Image: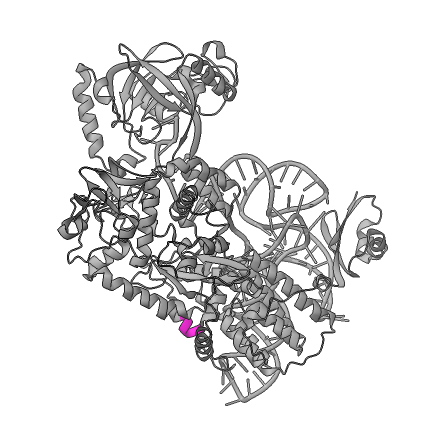
Amino acid sequence: MSAASGYDHITIEAKWRKRWEEQKLHNTDVHKAERPFYNLMMFPYPSAEGLHVGNVFAFLGSDIYARFTRMQGYDVFEPMGFDAFGMHSENYALKIGTNPRELTPRSIRHFREKQMKMLGAMFDWSHEVQTTDPAYYKWTQWIFIQLFKQGLAYKKKSPVNWCPSCKTVLADEQVMGGACERCRTEVGKRDLEQWYFRITKYAQRLLDNLDWIDWSETTKMAQRNWIGRSDGADLVFELQGRDETLTVFTTRPDTIFGATYMVLAPEHPLVGSLATDGYRDQVKAYVAKASRESEIERQDETREKTGVFTGSHGINPATGNPIPIWISDYVLMGYGTGAIMAVPAHDQRDFEFARKFELAIVQVISPDGREVPLEQAYVDPGVIINSGEFNGIPSEESKSKMTEWLAGEGKAEPKVNYRLRDWCISRQRYWGPPIPIIYCDKCGAIAVPDEDLPVMLPELADYRPDGTGLSPLARSEEFINTACPACGGPAKRETDVNDNFLDSAWYFLRYPSTEFPDRAFDTNITKKWLPVDMYIGGNEHACLHLMYTRFITMALHDAGLIEFEEPFKTFRAHGMIIKDGDKMSKSRGNIVNPDEYIENFGADCLRSYLMFMGPYLEGGDFRDEGIKGVRHFLERVWRRITEVRPTGEEIADPETLYAMHFATKAVTEDIRRLSYNTALARLMEMMNHAYKADIKTRIYYETLLRLLAPFAPHLAEELWERMGHGETILVSGWPAYDEIHTRKSEIEFVVQINGKVRSRIRVPADLSQEELEPIVFADEKVKEYTSGKTIVKKILVRNKLMNIVVR
RNA sequence: GCCCGGAUGGUGGAAUGGUAGACACAGCGGACUUAAAAUCCGCUGGGGCCUAAGGCUCCGUGUCGGUUCAAGUCCGACUCCGGGCACCA
């Protein structure tokens, strides 16, 4: 960029970077802090490609808030670290044939030294956390054990999502549209023994707390949907000619009289015994086919319903009629009881199935009490019909009535179900903390004793996953074989490593306590700093990281280890940035490389531009023409302050007083609500006024610099120093404003006639209706529009307008 | 299909139910300059009318309706775009 203004960002930014580091200005004394404020942002995954501009956008928005808070006198703690375990790093390591043990430190170094330190953020590197550090994952393992001891970790064999490319299992939320979230490979099913965390035990609490935590509404909504509470009833169906019963879950007990058949999931345990002789072969074939099908095939929305009849019948508990029992893959084993009562008249899926297999359709709810021919299922509420004594009752009301009635017969029970599933945390991979469990033939599965932690991840020459369904660790005899901590006999180690999301589910607890090698987090320090005051990150983590983190926090709370059960007082989801109206991606070749922009325009300029681009919480459009405007603004600030010799006088001019106080108020309020783009607009106005009115007063520029400091910290420091200040601008205090001066003494007052603007008059502020009316009605335009008309109404909006309604 | 967002000038975007388009980019004009760049200043939603500058007037926030003295903002239906979830009984 031009040096015409003398604004040399390279020199200035290097100077302040060095000075801040020498003075340890951004290191927080976690013990002595008097007004602690924990400012957290989601830590990055240090990929070999380098820092993405999306990360930078997230970090800077958080850092600006931190700087603002610090200038208000808080002891702000802004730690940073690296989420460096996981398949992404491991896959990349495999691809280029370098061990992740070598690759990861290299990536981290590049991230930290070459990129993150250039951003001008207040990162406190003295509390850095790396999840791959044994001193950290020791405590990740310890947390696993805490959950294990509470009965929240358990092992079960079940069909799991299997990514054939990553050669590992995936949690439900890591499968997107039937494909692996990381590598996009089609996900299949496998029967494997896995470790799970019982997050479902916390489903209701995770849901309830959403009512009071101060989080972005969009994030809360995503979590509510993911938890997916549904209220209904378990209904018991007798089986014709057998002693057993079959329980189904339904949210529509009001439709029970319309249940004309039942469907079991192919994996349902009763499938085998319900298949009668004539149907056994077709049932077997169907079950086999369903187990072979992939997620993608089963999720194809266009495909037709399939299924087979078992030959058996259940008894509808309301009507007493026998109804056929079918199996179909549209019923999922993992939800409810894995069996449903089908009400084709009032459920679209059942309707399609019944049409295809010519099963009876009985309408029991009608919009107006009359039966109508159905072209599709009628799913709305209405009036009950064809249901004996319940006829005529509104369907919503009959839900509880029918449940009560059947409950009286011992055939129903009100029930709540959640869509949320337990968290599968086993990974059959190398690059993660080994799950700290030892298997002994005599003693069973035993947690590794605390004094033996960490279970070190062994150095393996060959760390490739092999598709056996076992981790590469299983190939290391040295690793597997150990002694049972209980009986001392020969025992074997668990060979799975934990899901990467466990590493990041507790990192916020570690940051303040990094100095303690002998505990995961210190009680006093934790009491002082947590929960986190402000957490900023992407909404893509609403159902993953943020849900897991809340769960781990609750579990630790219940174990008596921490006092709070919600980790983040405030969470804000920032928006996404696009480039020239298009998504950023490698294939489009429109990736913004932050390094280049820092080099060419300066970190201050990139910071300010990213925030000016659009509303922080909604995201924005990165355009190269746009950044020039911000650079231009910073140069105007630079030029003005370096060229003017500011004087120490008081400001007398009311307009200048207004410009300064108004901007102070607006910027303060805007930053508080993360409306950074408008805050910058107010600063630009303040600068425009400085040129226009040729302001020379010192206080005006000092105010401007302090308001600008969170956005452009290097520039602000440099000019602050040049104005004769010895101390950093960070401790100069946040500017105060006087409410009196944030309002103009003379205003432009609008007069509307019948809602249309007809005249604008200049009047003193704060006039009453009595004072205004003579002035308004003396106005020529007002006279013109009201003459000969009847005035029906006059509405005064103080200091804004008067609307005169005439007829 | 369901759940969340969103749609405002040539462009990015402002606007507690109260003057739509703040701020910025691009464009145009002026000053400075031999010239250009840079800089500073001004104009800049669309149409029409009158005029000397300037003024007057109508239309305008995805579409159609509604509420209100007043709607970009609230309500109802719809279209399109982005994101998330997806046979969850």
Asked if one can make out residue A575 in the rendered structure from this viewpoint, the answer is no
Towards the viewer: A517 or A61: A517
Residue nearer the viewer, A17 or A185: A17
Residue A580 higher or lower than A656, as above or below: above
Residue A796, placed above or below residue A626? above
Q: Residue at x 45, y 70 (%)?
A: A603
Image location of residue A436, percent across then percent down:
26, 47
Residue A399 x, y percent position in the rendering: 48, 20
Q: Report the quarter where the N terminus of chain A lies.
A: bottom left
Rendered location of residue B74, percent (x, y) = 60, 41
Q: Which residues are magenta?
A: A597-601
Give the position of the C terminus of chain A as an image quadrant. top right
Tell me if I can see residue A659 in this picture: yes
Most frequent secondary structure within the magenta stretch = helix
Name the residue: 67% across, 66% down.
A661
Image coordinates of residue A296 in percent, x first then y, are 27, 39
User: On the picture, is A694 further left or further right than A614?
Assistant: right
Q: Nearer the viewer, residue A790 or A272?
A: A272
- Disc tally is 0
In this rendering, the answer to whether A596 lies above or below A407 is below
**A235 above or below A305?**
above
- Residue at image position (17%, 48%) is A480
- Residue appearing at x 17%, y 38% in the figure: A441
